[in-house]
Amino acid sequence: MNKLEYQKLYVLEKKHWWFKVSRTFYKKIFKKFMAKNKIPLMLDIGCGTGITMKNFSSIGTIVGMDFNLIPLALSQKRGLKLLVQADMCRLPFKENSFDGIITLDVLEHIP
């Protein structure tokens, strides 16, 4: 996506019903599978502009990862700091580093 599209998404995904419902639905499912006795460390692959990270942060600590610097800059604008630029096919993390992985609206864009 280009910079203008990311900027539109930055505004739209906060209030559009599709994004709100999607985040609520997945957060509920994700929360169900997280251990109750510890604060989970999560990875958001394809974090985009960071709205999902912001929403899921009430569950635990979340690291955002995206291939593109533009959405990572917009994530920073949301006040998010744990951000990494990387390719999901070459994760820069040790195996079993995270308690859970989120990848919303990503896989359907891969040929």
Image (tube, helix red, strand yellow):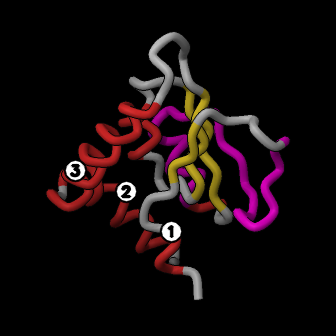
Please name the residue shown 44% across and 29% down the image.
57
- Is 82 inside the magenta-drawn segment? yes
Which residue is tagged 2?
10
> Earlier along the polypeptide chain: callout 3 or callout 1?
3
Task: Name the element at disc 1.
Answer: loop
Residue 48: x and y in percent read 50, 57
- Does 79 sit above or below residue 105? above
Q: Which is closer to the viewer, label 1 or label 2?
A: 1
Residue 106 marker: 1
Percent position (x, y) of residue 102? 51, 49
Residue 65 at what x, y percent from top left? Answer: 64, 51
What is the span of residues highlighted in magenta in the rendered image?
71-94
Residue 5 falls in image quadrant = bottom left
- Relative placement, left or right, of 62 versus 22 is right
- Report the residue that reaches farthest toward the bottom: 111
For marks 1 and 2 on the same chain, the one whose residue lies earlier in the sequence:
2
The image quadrant where one finds the C terminus is bottom right
- Quote the CA–CA distance across marks 3 and 2: 13 Å
| Crowd tier of the residue under label 3, counting other residues whose Cα lies within 10 Å: few below 14, some 14–19, many 20 or above | some
Q: Nearer the viewer, residue 106 or 10?
A: 106
Label 3 SS:
helix
Q: Is residue 90 left or right of residue 29?
A: right
Asked if residue 73 is among those painted magenta in the image, a careful observer would answer yes
Q: Circle 3 is placed at which residue position?
A: 20
